[in-house]
Structures are given as structure tokens and as C-alpha cells.
Amino acid sequence: MKKYNVAIIGYGWVATAHIQAINATPHAQVVAVYSSRPQDNAALSARHGGTIEAYTDLAAMLKRKDIHAVSVCSYPSQHAAHIIAAAKAGKHIILEKPITLSLADAKAAAAAVKKAGVKTCVCFECRFSSQFQATKSVIDAGLLGAIHYGEVDYYHGIGPWYGQFRWNTGKANGGSSLLSAGCHAMDALLLCMGGEVEAVTSYATRSENKTFAQYEYATTTVTILKFSGGRIGKVASVIDCLQPYYFHTHLVGSEGSLLDNKFHSARLNGLNKHAWSSLSMKMLDSGDVSDHPYQSQFEAFFAALERGEDMPLTNLTESMKSHRAVIAADMSVELGREVKMKEVR
């Protein structure tokens, strides 16, 4: 397998986690970093290993023929422009969430990617976590039967103690509770439920705690989703809570239920129906980007590149389904009504 050279666009907190994960794969190495703030080549190389060249001119970096892919870690408001520039330069793209802050920008970025024929990897990395790989295995094995209700909720207080807070409070880059962070829960619900989302209804509120007062948008939302076949789901995105990080998952099917790392199934003889059975898996219990399963996701991306195939699970086309559901939920809050998915095509 060839060694892919990767450039980073935007050198902030999440970029350091991307660099560590990329360099930890056997398939790729970071060789360049673009930042609006001047960086020192020697310092970057010493911090991250290898030889890294720093740029303050994005076009100059993208002209390098030896760079095969870029990782877009810039502010969300810059994502569309950076995706389009990278696609036009013929670079494969790793993209930190959210895809963009608007549907129009997401569609423009997707069009550029399609025209260029480059491959993509969107950082809905929870799909590659132990928790959701095990959860999906339980579903695929039929232990829950046909799922008719599911809820996945994101509880993570993003205050001054968290790196993202610095720019996350403004609507210009934070966007909404779902766009800034809760989109992981939306994506996980769609993974578990399958099928198509037909309509969403969302409501919003916010904490009165002064810690979260500078947020320019509602920091708690709850979204009800109507799926094909009459199934329903719920996603809460709560980034103004004062509690430990919690990625709540509850799936209810015709043959059993799953609650976080516990399950019960009528398809397994001898189980005590009055008690949960436990699943051995690493839970998503931290918002620290260094704990995210980036390495597993990036290894799958580079392996797909080697095969000339689209990234499984989190290519841009697949991830746009979750992004559209997030956009629809935010539209529902703004309009005060149900939003049908055909409105965000």
C-alpha cells in the first residue's frame, strides 16, 4: 500500500487530533499545514513527527503535486470554500464536522467534489467507535427485530473549559446546538434506524446558567423524526448541561431493546426478561477529541483510497443524509413547524 501525503487546512485543537491519528495509521503522514497564523516548520515537525512544511498561502500548498489528500479542520464557516478549493486541486478530502453551516454551501461543496471525482471522509467518527460498531452488529444480527423507535441523545456541556467554546458560542461558526456537536447523535440515530427520514419537528430552549449566556443560539434542542414505514426517533442535543458527558442510546424493536451497553432479546433463549444483559464495548464517554476514534476511521479511508472505492459509512454522499436532517431540524426551530425532508433536497 502506498504512503499518502496529507495536508492540514486549519491548525487548531481538532487538527492536532487529526494529525496524531493520520500519522498513527500505516498508510499516511502529514507533510504540510495551512494556517492563517504563521507556524514554524521545525516546531511543527518536532511536535508531530516527520517533516512538516507550514503555509499561510492555501493555494501554494494545494499546488504541491506530492500531496494526495487534505484534512479540513478550519472554522465551519470556511468549510465550503476549503472543500471546493481542495476538490479543484484534485485532493481527496477528510472533513471535520459539520459539513457546512448551510444547505446551499453543502450542495456547492458536494457538486465540486462530484465534478473533481475525489474521495471523501466526513468525521462522523462515532460510526467507527466500539460502541456503535457493537450496536450495529446487534441490530444486523436481528436480536432487536424490526426497530420501530430509537433515541440517541448528546449531553455535553460545552463551556469555557472546552477548547471549542472559544468560537462555538457565535452563530457564525457554532451555527446551532446540532451543527456544533449534536450532529453526532443525529448521525448515530440514522445509522441505527436505517431507511429514510421523511419529516422532522424540533424544539429549542436554553439554560439560565450564566456560564452559557454568551451563546448566540439555543443550546438545547429536541428533534422528533418520522422515518419511512411509520417508525419514529428522537435526538436531544444538549450542550449547556452540567454533568458528565453522556451519549444516550435506546433502541426498541419487535424482538428486543438496547439501552447504551445493555440489551434484551426474545431471540436468545434463557435470558432473564427482568434484567438487562451486558455488552462488552468501549463507550463514547468523552468529548475530548483525543479520545475520538479518528484512527480507525482514517485507516478505513486510506484503505478505500487504495482500492479506488468510496469511503464506507462516512463518505460525503452518505453523510449528507445526516446533515440534511440537522438542517431540517434547525429549520423546524426557526419556522415553528414540521419540516418535510423534500424541503431540504
Image (cartoon, helix red, strand yellow):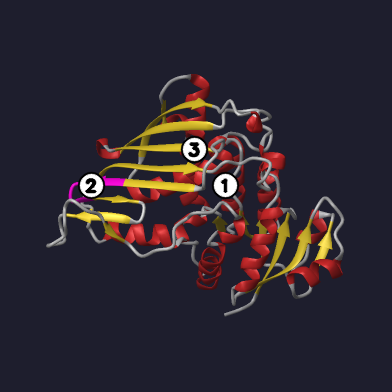
Residue lying at 23% horizontally and 53% vertically, measured from the top left: 144
Which element type, helix, strand or loop, lies under badge 2? strand
Q: Nearer the viewer, mark 1 or mark 3?
A: 3
Left-right relation of 297 to 257: right
For label 3, the crowd category at 10 Å Cα-Cα, with few meaning under 14, some 14 to 19 and many 20 or more, is many
Give the labeled residue for mark 2. 253
The x and y percentages for residue 218 are 57, 28
Q: Is residue 193 left or right of residue 242?
A: left
Question: Relative to residue 234, is residue 270 depicted above or below?
Answer: below
Are circles 2 and 3 on residues that touch, CB within 8 Å? no
Tag 3 residue: 237
Q: Quadrant of the N terminus?
A: bottom right
Specify the farthest residue to the top: 336
Q: Amino acid at mark 3?
A: Ser
Residue displayed at 49% across by 62% down? 310
Cα distance, mark 2 to mark 1?
35 Å
The amino acid beneath tag 1 is: Ala
Looking at the image, residue 188 lies above or below residue 283:
above
Image location of residue 53, percent across then percent down: 82, 67
Per the model, the C-alpha gap separating discs 1 and 3 is: 26 Å
Q: Is residue 77 visible?
A: no
Q: Secondary structure at mark 3?
A: strand
Crowding at mark 1 (Cα within 10 Å: few <14, some 14-19, many 20+): many
Q: Residue at x 87, y 56 (%)?
A: 38
Q: Is residue 132 magenta?
A: no
**Magenta-highlighted residues:** 251-256
